[in-house]
Amino acid sequence: MRIKEIPSPQEQTLWNNFRAGDEVAFTQLSTRYYRMFRHYGEKFTTNSQIIEDAIQDLLVNLWVKRTSLTEVDSVKFYLLKAFRNQLFKTLRAFSAVPLEEDFQENFSEASSEMFFIENESQQEQQSKISYFLKQLPDRQREILYLRFYQDLRVEEIAQLLQIKPQSVSNIIQRALLNLRQHWELLVPFILLWLL
């Protein structure tokens, strides 16, 4: 299930009102992006307390620093990047499970939210898809998640992960090549991602 975008002017208005100290706008932004933060955090850790702490720390920091924040092209991208940075700080502070282990266990959960499984045949297909995604390296899975689930552009992913856009494109291509051997099974899944 994708997070539907607020039309850009409304999102910008909320952002600017929040920066001016409007608590209602801050509450609306926090409520709107809370699920995105939770869902993205679950790709890195199963510890819900760490995710909650990272979200709370981010929100407190945003409120405290609101007057020094600038206008942004994409509120969603800015907040996703800020949350990712805060989550990694929180994970280091808690000395959590290494990212690779936890990420591998949790990435398949996103796919189960993308469509409703109606019978055992579909459940079996879902299981195979999760298995194939788990075979991908962590970086490939994260980039596929950001590109197809969060609808970030290649340039935004590159900025978020602090790598070159060409590297993002290359990683997406490698991931799709890795999945190609199971293409006939994965095409319906990928089409649902793209819709």
Image (spheres, rainbow, N blue to C red):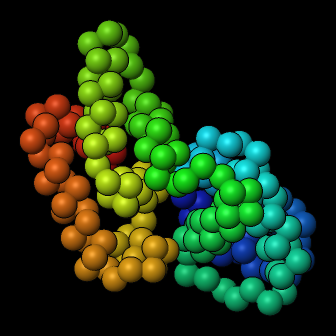
In the displayed structure image, the side of residue 141 where residue 13 appears, left or right: right
For the residue pair 52 and 77, the one nearer the viewer reads as 52
Image position, residue 79 (x, y; %): 64, 69
Q: Which of 96 and 158 is in front in this view?
A: 96
Residue at coordinates 37% horizontally, 60% vertically from top-left?
Answer: 139
In the drawing, does residue 6 fall left or right of residue 13?
A: left
Pinpoint residue 103: horizontal percent, then vertical percent: 48, 48
Does residue 21 appear in this view?
yes
Residue 6's image quarter?
bottom right
Q: Is residue 6 left or right of residue 23?
A: left
Q: Which residue is drawn at 53% across and 54% down?
A: 99
Tag count in the figure? 0
Residue at image coords 20%, 37%? 186
Q: Residue at x 52, y 45 (%)?
A: 102
Residue 79 appears in view? no
Q: Where is residue 63 in the image (x, y as percent from the top left)?
A: 85, 73
Name the spot of residue 100 as percent of width and height, x first.
46, 52
